[in-house]
Image (tube, rainbow, N blue to C red):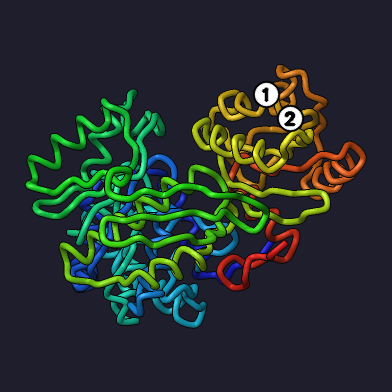
Amino acid sequence: MIEEPEAIKRLYKLHTMGIKPGLERVGALLARMGNPERELAVVHVTGTNGKGSVCALIDSILRAAGYKTGIYTSPHLLRLNERIRVDGKCVADAELLPLIEEVERHALEVQAVHGEVTFFEFTTALAFEYFRRKGARLVVAEVGMGGRLDATNVITPLLSVITSISVEHSMYLGPDVPSIAREKAGIIKQGRPVICGDLDESALAVISRVAAGNNARLVSAKEAVDVRMISQDFKGQKIAVMGANDDYSTIVMPLLGRHQIENCAIAVAAVEELDRFAGLPVGAEAIRKGIRTVQWPGRCQILAVDPLTILDGGHNPGAAEKLSVTVRELAKKQPVGLVFGMCDDKDVNGFLQPFSKIVKACWAVTIRTDRAVPRSQLVSAAGRFGWRVQEADLAAAIADAKRWALENKGIVCIAGSLYLVGEVMELIGYRPFEQEMAQP
């Protein structure tokens, strides 16, 4: 396990505060810091799935266009520093640690009046202040959960983006898609455009009403931008992109999976709207380069080709459905060995169901978190699908799965949690955003 500095260990202890939706505490904290968020021009991104990929694509395109950008995403895979990046580079400990101590002093003042600041509220304030100090005035910010009461929603964005909406975090966001759509629509602001992905009718009806009520132009990415897959292999997918502004021709995007086609369309629609609404030009070549060079580790990432080994952080039924389609396309008719571990707030059976027809062998692992589902429970859940199921620690599970794949001319898929992705990266010595993703 990577040893973190003491200041970051203290910050992690704020996790014990749990999730406390609301803007009062983070607003008070930012006010004591001089409201750094008011000096930032933000693209604000929410959604059930795809929001991280869309953030990565928008940031990559804006950097290719020559803008100095900040990007704030969550969770991290190995180190907290990954959440806060300027021009693609993670904040260094030398800058992060003194800033944590400074924000801690402000947080103590807030605590006396409003109660203890949560982990996500703290890191959000930390990110906005870091971006201000580094002069990264153009920022892509990913919502942590929901939208309306998420700590990031203290900003008035240049534009808002809603990638997808399905049932998640029902305890906080509501029991059904319309309820969750209302929460996510909370990031829509007066007069600021909204880009949306392919939403079902009930979600789109809610988003449309909120956008109209805020005099916010609503842009459907699938209507504004056409992205088609031409081919796909281990190095990425060749796509044809036609936007509202230009024909961007064919591009090889390193992100695998048909679901990334929609994410790419959303990102292109967003940067084209930035040009139209905010006068921030992004040329055709920058869009092509940004798509071609985007990095989003741990999402359908190819770790090896002999046997083919895929690492993905998918952890809900919707993500599993998309991942299983990609695995089927890459594996063709080869059998699949699944290595998986999950958190106890996730739908284990719903996650496994999409793999039911392609997985032949399975290894259950306990991920390194207090919220991990014990291996015995994972074995029981996976056993219902008639697979050969074993439990093992992570290193042994991966080694055995690779042996099985070589013997059976199969492939290996490792998925179920971003915590699991981080552990795999630690095991193989890979540092996200600090080295290029391996090219098979």
The amino acid at mark 1 is: Ser
Pick the residue in front: 18 or 336. 336
Residue 404 at least partly seen:
yes
Q: Is residue 168 above or below residue 314?
A: above
Q: Residues within 10 Å of mark 1 (few under 14, many from 20)?
A: some
Horizontally, residue 255 falls left or right of residue 216, namely right
Q: Quadrant of the N terminus?
A: bottom right
x and y percentages locating residue 33 in the rendered image: 24, 72
According to the picture, the residue beneath numbered tag 2 turns out to be 359
- Residue 356's disc is 1
Pick the residue in front: 423 or 400. 400
Residue 104 at least partly seen:
no
Q: Is residue 218 above or below residue 342?
A: below
Q: Is residue 193 above or below residue 271?
A: above
Horizontally, residue 400 falls left or right of residue 62, namely right
> Which residue corresponds to the image point at 56% horizontal and 45% vertical from the top-left?
257
Label 2 with label 1: CB-CB less than 8 Å: yes
